[in-house]
C-alpha cells in the first residue's frame, strides 16, 4: 500500500502526576522531531487505517535535569477513538530492544527483498491493530532511547529502576494522547515478564492509579534473582525435558517422530513431572534396573542413547543437549528456537547471544540492525540522533536485581493484582521449541500460583521463544489474542 502522508510532528507534554523521580517531556531540543506516517493494512477481511508515530520522550531526574530518553513507536487506528484499547509492548533482555514483538504484532513486517538480497517491508495480516492500538517501547539505552547524562545509568539499570521509568512513560503517553479512558493492556516477552508485573504493581499503587484490563506474557521470566520457585517440580532437568523432546522430534531424533510434535511434547512433560521426577528424587537409592528403564524412556524422547543418559546421572543438561543432539553434523541447535541449527565451527566464534543459531545472523539473509534502521529512517522518516541498539551488553551486565522487600515471584505479583483488580485477565503464551526459558517452567509456576481460573489462560504453540516471530503460528496466536481482548473488554 502507498503511504498516505508522512510528516514530522512537534509534541508538547505535561509532566504532572508522574511517578517520582522521573518526569517526561517531548519536543525538546535534545530529541529529534517525531515522525508520522498514515497508511492502512488489511487484517482478515478488514482494512484498518492507522497513524504511526515514532518519537523520543525526555526523562528527568528528581532535580529536573534531563537524564535519558525513551523511544516509542505508536500505531493508532483511524479515525482516532479515545476509548479504544491501547497496548504497551516490551521485549526483554534486560537490555533488549522491542523488535520481535513489533515485527510479530505491528502492521508491517520485514522480509527478504526479491532476489534474496536486502530487505523489504510488507503488510502483516496477523497484526492485532484491528482490536487495539499498539505502543512498542524501548527503555533507556536500547533501540533509539539514549542517555543524556551518563551518570544517570544506575538509576535505570535495574528491576525497580527500569519499572519506575517505564511506568512514568506509560502515564505520560496516556496523558499526551488523551487515552486515560481507554482499556489498557501490557504485553511482555522474556525478561519483560518481570518488567510488566512490576510496572502494573507500581501503577496500581500510584497517586493517580492506572488499571489494566489484561496482561499478556510471552515466554516470560517468572522471578527476580534469588526467588525460590513455587512449583515442586522445579529441577531444571525436569523443566527442560519437554522442550528437549520437541527439539529432538523436529530434528528427526528419538522414537516418536511420526506423531504430532505437541502431542509428544505434552506426553514428555507428563513423563518429566512423573516417573522422571521421582527417579531424580530417589538419587542413589534408585535401583540399576529402574535407572536403566528411566534412561531408556528418556532416550525415546531425547534422541540420545540410553547409556549416555544413564552415565550422565539421567540429567542431559541444556548446553550438552544443544551441542550434541546433532553431533553427527558437527552442528549445534538454537537456544531461543531449537529448530535452528548451525555449524559449531561458526557458532563458537560468536559472542552470546549471537552464538545462538536462532538469532538473526543465521535465520535472515539481511542484517537485522540495518533493517531496523531502514524501517525507521526510510519507511517512517524518523531521523534519530544515535545508532539503533538491539542489545545493550552494558545494561544486561550492570542490571540491579535487588528489590525492596526481597526477590519477587511474578505469578504471586499477578495473583495479588488480580485480587485487587477483578477485571484483570492474564494470558500465558509459550513456545515448545524454547530452550531459553523452557515452557514447562513458566507454566508450572503460574499453575502453582493458582490464579483465578476464569481470568487466567495459557497456550502452547509449535514455536520458539519469540512466539510471534514464527510465521507458521502467528495467525493462530494472534487469533487467540483477539479472543483474549474480547473477553477482557466484554466484547
Image (cartoon, rainbow, N blue to C red):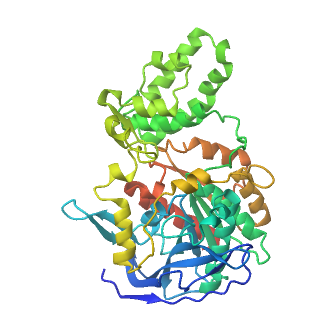
Residue at 64% from the left image edge and 66% from the top image edge: 152
Q: Which of 320 and 314 is in front in this view?
A: 320
Residue 191, image quadrant: bottom right
Residue at 59% from the left image edge and 66% from the top image edge: 150
Residue at the extreme left: 115
Q: Is residue 31 above or below residue 352?
A: below
Q: Is residue 264 visible?
A: no
**Quarter of the C terminus within the rendering:** bottom right
**Quarter of the N terminus within the rendering:** bottom left
Residue 213, image quadrant: bottom right
- Relative to 244, is 155 on the left or the right? right
Q: Is residue 351 visible?
A: yes
Q: Is residue 119 above or below residue 8?
A: above
Q: Which of 89 and 303 is in front in this view?
A: 89
Residue 144 rendering spot, x and y as whole percentages: 48, 70
Residue 473 rendering spot, x and y as whole percentages: 42, 55
Residue 471, image quadrant: bottom left
Residue at 58% from the left image edge and 41% from the top image edge: 440
Residue 34 rendering spot, x and y as whole percentages: 48, 83
Residue 296 rendering spot, x and y as whole percentages: 49, 19
Residue at 38% from the left image edge and 62% from the top image edge: 369
Amino acid at each position: 500500500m502507498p503511504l498516505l502522508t508522512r510528516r514530522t510532528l512537534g509534541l508538547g507534554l505535561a509532566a504532572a502526576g508522574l511517578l517520582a523521580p522521573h518526569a517526561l517531556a517531548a519536543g525538546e531540543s535534545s530529541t529529534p522531531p517525531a515522525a508520522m506516517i498514515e497508511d492502512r493494512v488489511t487484517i482478515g477481511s478488514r482494512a484498518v487505517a492507522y497513524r504511526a508515530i515514532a518519537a523520543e520522550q525526555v526523562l528527568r531526574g528528581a532535580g529536573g535535569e534531563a537524564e535519558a530518553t525513551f523511544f516509542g513507536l505508536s500505531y493508532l487506528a483511524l479515525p482516532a477513538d479515545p476509548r479504544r484499547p491501547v497496548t504497551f509492548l516490551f521485549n526483554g533482555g534486560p537490555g533488549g530492544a522491542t523488535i520481535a514483538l513489533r515485527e510479530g504484532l505491528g502492521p508491517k513486517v520485514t522480509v527478504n527483498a526479491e532476489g534474496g538480497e536486502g530487505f523489504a517491508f510488507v503488510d502483516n495480516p496477523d497484526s492485532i491493530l484491528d482490536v487495539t492500538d499498539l505502543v512498542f517501547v524501548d527503555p533507556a539505552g536500547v533501540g533509539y532511547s539514549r542517555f543524556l547524562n551518563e551518570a544517570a545509568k544506575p538509576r535505570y539499570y535495574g528491576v525497580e529502576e527500569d519499572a519506575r521509568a517505564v511506568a512514568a512513560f506509560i502515564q505520560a503517553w496516556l496523558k499526551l494522547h488523551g487515552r486515560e479512558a481507554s482499556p489498557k493492556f501490557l504485553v511482555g516477552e522474556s525478561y519483560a515478564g518481570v518488567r510488566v508485573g512490576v510496572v502494573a504493581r507500581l501503577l496500581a499503587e500510584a497517586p493517580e492509579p492506572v488499571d489494566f484490563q489484561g496482561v499478556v506474557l510471552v515466554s516470560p521470566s517468572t522471578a527476580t534473582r534469588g526467588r525460590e520457585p513455587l512449583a515442586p517440580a522445579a529441577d531444571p532437568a525436569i523443566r527442560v525435558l519437554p522442550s528437549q523432546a520437541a527439539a529432538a522430534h523436529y530434528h528427526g531424533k528419538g522414537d516418536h517422530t511420526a506423531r504430532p510434535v505437541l502431542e509428544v511434547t505434552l506426553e514428555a512433560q507428563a513423563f518429566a513431572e512423573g516417573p522422571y521426577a521421582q527417579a531424580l528424587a530417589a538419587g542413589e537409592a534408585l535401583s540399576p534396573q529402574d535407572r536403566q528403564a528411566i534412561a531408556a524412556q528418556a532416550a525415546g524422547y531425547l534422541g540420545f542413547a540410553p547409556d549416555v543418559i544413564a552415565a550422565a546421572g539421567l540429567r542431559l543438561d541444556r548446553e550438552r543437549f544443544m551441542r550434541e543432539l546433532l553431533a553427527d553434523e558437527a552442528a549445534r541447535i538454537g537456544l531461543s528456537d531449537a529448530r535452528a541449527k548451525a555449524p559449531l565451527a561458526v557458532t563458537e566464534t560468536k559472542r552470546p547471544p549471537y552464538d545462538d543459531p536462532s538469532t538473526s545472523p543465521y535465520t535472515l539473509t539481511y542484517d537485522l540492525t540495518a533493517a531496523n534502521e531502514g524501517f525507521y529512517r526510510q519507511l517512517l522518516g524518523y531521523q534519530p540522533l544515535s545508532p539503533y541498539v538491539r542489545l545493550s551488553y552494558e545494561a544486561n551486565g550492570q542490571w540491579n536485581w535487588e528489590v525492596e522487600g526481597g526477590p519477587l515471584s511474578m505469578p504471586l505479583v499477578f495473583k495479588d493484582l488480580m485480587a485487587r483488580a477483578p477485571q484483570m485477565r492474564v494470558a500465558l503464551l509459550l513456545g515448545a521449541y524454547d530452550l531459553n526459558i523452557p515452557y514447562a517452567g513458566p507454566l508450572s509456576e503460574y499453575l502453582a500460583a493458582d490464579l483465578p481460573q476464569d481470568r487466567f489462560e495459557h497456550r502452547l504453540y509449535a514455536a520458539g521463544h519469540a512466539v510471534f516471530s514464527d510465521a507458521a503460528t502467528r495467525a493462530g496466536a494472534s487469533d487467540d489474542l483477539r479472543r483474549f481482548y474480547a473477553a477482557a473488554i466484554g466484547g
